[in-house]
Image (tube, grey):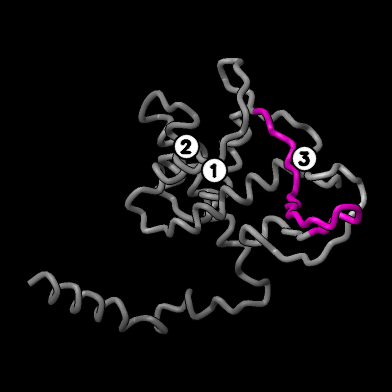
Amino acid sequence: MRCPFCQFPDNRVLESRSAESGHSVRRRRECLRCGRRFTTYERIEFVPVVVLKKSGERESFDRSKLLRGIVTACEKTGLAHSKLEGIVDEIEAELQQRSAREVSSTEIGELVLKHLQGLNEVAYIRFASVHRQFKGIRDFIETLNHLQSSSEQSDVTMLSPNEDTSSELDPSATATEPEEELETSSMSHS
């Protein structure tokens, strides 16, 4: 690191501390020739990721654009903004770890859908309708069926092989519950 005052290449670090919420390191240095002090910042260099759009255009990955799309899909779902930013962080980190510097917008959209699938079904359908460019109700139905079947598969895998489900199948074990439900639901409507 050259001194900004006399251009001498040798200096010593007086102190180092975390800066910018842990995203960089701030170092106070002193030139070994002129004795003047200066500050440097050390940051992680991210190699830019290029997004190949459906139209064939290329543009730099823009995390704010991705976040806007996710926020729009998640409107009025009650999901915390920090959770949505976390999704963008995870996707951006995954893209940075890849050796390929180019990624298709379709691939990014599928990564978002993978995160939304277990998080919120309404947000998933909203995002899928834009990302996959639904043409009609049939596209919605196909996506809903896929979502339901994958949800059922995950429910089945959550049951352990030794789990006793006999009480769920035994009608005498739950004979009083449906009647109680009827009573409470009829009271709430009156």
Determine the residue positioned at 65% across, 72% down: 160
Q: Position of residue 100 (x, y in %)?
A: 78, 32
Determine the residue positioned at 92% across, 51% down: 10
The kind of secondary structure element at disc 2 is: helix
Against 62, is 153 above or below? Answer: below
Q: Which residue position is annotated with label 2?
A: 128
- Whether residues under marks 1 and 3 lie with C-beta atoms below 8 angstroms apart, the answer is no
Which of 109 and 101 lies nearest the eye of the viewer?
101
Q: Which residue position is annotated with label 3?
A: 98
Task: Please tell me how many numbered marks the rendered image carries.
Answer: 3
The kind of secondary structure element at disc 3 is: loop
Q: Nearer the viewer, mark 1 or mark 3?
A: 3
Residue extending farthest to the top is: 56
Q: What's the distance in space between the residues labelled 1 and 2, CA to CA? A: 7 Å
Q: Quadrant of residue 12?
A: bottom right
The kind of secondary structure element at disc 1 is: helix
- For the C terminus, the image quarter is bottom left
Q: What's the distance in space between the residues labelled 3 and 2, CA to CA? A: 24 Å
Q: Which residue position is annotated with label 1?
A: 113
